[in-house]
Amino acid sequence: MTEATYLELKVVVLAGGVGGSKMVNGLAQILPPENLFIIANTADDFEHLGLAISPDLDTIMYTLAGANNPETGWGRTGETWQVMDELRRLKGPAWFNLGDKDLAASLLRTHWLRQGQPLSRVTAQLCRRFGVAQTLMPMTDQAVRTIVETDEGQLSFQEYFVRRRCEPEVQRLIYEGAGSAEPNPAASAAIQAADLIVIAPSNPLLSIDPILALPGLARAIRGAAAPKIGVSPIIGETAVKGPAAKVMRELGLEVSPVGVASYLKAVLTGFVFDTVDQAHQGRLADQGLATLCTNTLMRSAADQARLARELAEFSLRLAKK
Amino acid sequence: MTEATYLELKVVVLAGGVGGSKMVNGLAQILPPENLFIIANTADDFEHLGLAISPDLDTIMYTLAGANNPETGWGRTGETWQVMDELRRLKGPAWFNLGDKDLAASLLRTHWLRQGQPLSRVTAQLCRRFGVAQTLMPMTDQAVRTIVETDEGQLSFQEYFVRRRCEPEVQRLIYEGAGSAEPNPAASAAIQAADLIVIAPSNPLLSIDPILALPGLARAIRGAAAPKIGVSPIIGETAVKGPAAKVMRELGLEVSPVGVASYLKAVLTGFVFDTVDQAHQGRLADQGLATLCTNTLMRSAADQARLARELAEFSLRLAKK
């Protein structure tokens, strides 16, 4: 397998925030930018202090621009906090951290949205300003909002995730508006033209599920000819970052690569999981999935690129069958 | 005349931005806070980057809080510019300067407005957070917007004032929404209960006119028993600050205290003007106005307090007649 082979692949990635952005960044290191298409979850988006906040789009954009803060997993590197400090002094709502640089991007997004531009165009413009050459797309231009039903009642996603730090027990997830939302047409087109569809190691419930909850996108993915390869966000019995393991457990799913693969199997043909979970290989194969067992932990940019390369080569093998 | 006398006056001030805030600050120095009521122009308000911006309310609030920047006449002292710097780097709309501290107040206002709270309540809450004990009120909770018809076409007030630096020639001023806007009920009540109504040395056209364009407020002021005293923003043939002289000239008004008094005479019983304009005393008296000729330039807080004291004493003399 030579590099020249996978360089020609048109790759679509379905992604949420942190885990998604690492996988995306790996693929960005090995592919020409015009061949990488990212469809991001927007069900975590919300309006805060009058601003349109898109956490997953921003995390991926900042990562591709090399402007992300790798320590927090969200927000900008070299960030300052003048506005938040003053908002706190005024006893305003300061539970959602928005750095000054981060705020500037949200102000610009809000400005364009209020002018009537769709989120997909706004995202493309922001990417251009950030020097991001890959195609980053919201899953839809319409509002889809995750509602978390918990033992403390219904919470918006950010209330659950940031304000309540994922502490309440999840009983049900609702992706409000997903059933009737039109997919972003460019996202559907990218899926149809793809040589490889990657389901990034993002939270299968809170990040991937909202994308698949758009009937048009789920249909496009199921109908696509390309290999569809998921990467497990669960290594051993825990998630690398975030509440994936806790939420899976609370919703009665097995917290393992098998649990992830079973949940997503309607849209998978292949699955990548970690060597620490090698014992599960048989159960994954039983689900009719081609598998790649490798080191999936992405600690560095080099890890990201290596995993992306293995994933791309795995997909070429699948496509040949 | 003893201090004890004017300490009991309930004073209402109609005010715009810079000139208004200086007069308000003078009165704040000599009156107990519960006796000072400010009705601010909101026709300069606008939405920018998704935020609700209220320049005159903020200038007065910052001034009363001792948090204003006296050099610029707008914004906060000790301000930082992290967000604007980043917005500029992203080639976003950076023509309207919003410092980080200033932004925090606008974010909080926008947050409360989006919750459905009226601007009057939002303003009261902001004042409380800033430790302002006087009663600062928007003229109305509804949207009134100044449109400037110029030789370059129609401009919103901020486009004319900030973006185009008052350079286009003004042909007509329109206070969109003023004719049908309900006055803030607390403003009407304050006017009715007032012992003195002051028309601050703000731009008579762009700052005072929009307040008087609310039929309910103009009626309340005309019907009020209290002395109604204007302070000339024109000293000699120029405005202390801002485009008042230029706009008056372009609209065919005499640029002098007489021009100001004539324009406002339906709501005036007395008028304060500067000693450099002493020659105009006769023409002002001819309009049936009681006059006070004194040093009206407010360079320092002491100047503001002295002018406020003279104004209060002048009103007591008028009330006795």
Image (spheres, coloured by chain):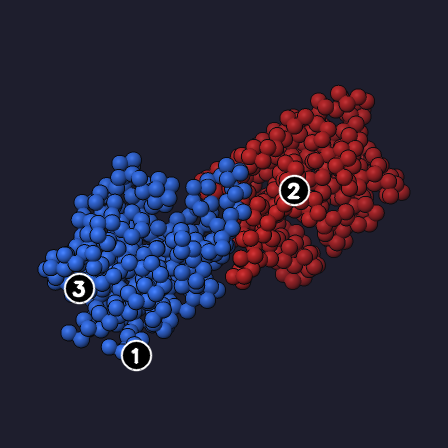
Chain colours: A blue, B red
Chain of residue at mark 1? A
Residue A225 figure quarter: bottom left
> Is there a contact, CB below 8 Å, between mark 3 and mark 2?
no
Q: Which residue sits at x=61%, y=47%?
A: B79
Kindly report which numbered mark, 3 or 2, lies closer to the viewer in this rendering. Answer: 3
Residue annotated with mark 2: B68
Q: Residues within 10 Å of mark 1 (few under 14, many from 20)?
A: few
Q: Which mark is residue A291?
A: 3
Q: Which residue sits at x=83%, y=40%?
A: B274
> Is there a contact, CB below 8 Å, between mark 2 and mark 1?
no
Q: Which mark is residue A4?
A: 1
Nearer-the-camera pick, B41 or A239:
A239
Whether residue B214 is situated above or below residue B238 in the rendered picture: above
| Cα distance between the residues tagged 2 and 1 | 62 Å
Kindly report which numbered mark, 2 or 1, lies closer to the viewer in this rendering. Answer: 1
Q: Which residue sits at x=25%, y=45%?
A: A246
What SS does tag 3 mark?
strand
Identity, as a three-letter code, of the amino acid under mark 2: Asn
Residue A9 figure quarter: bottom left
Residue B13 figure quarter: top right
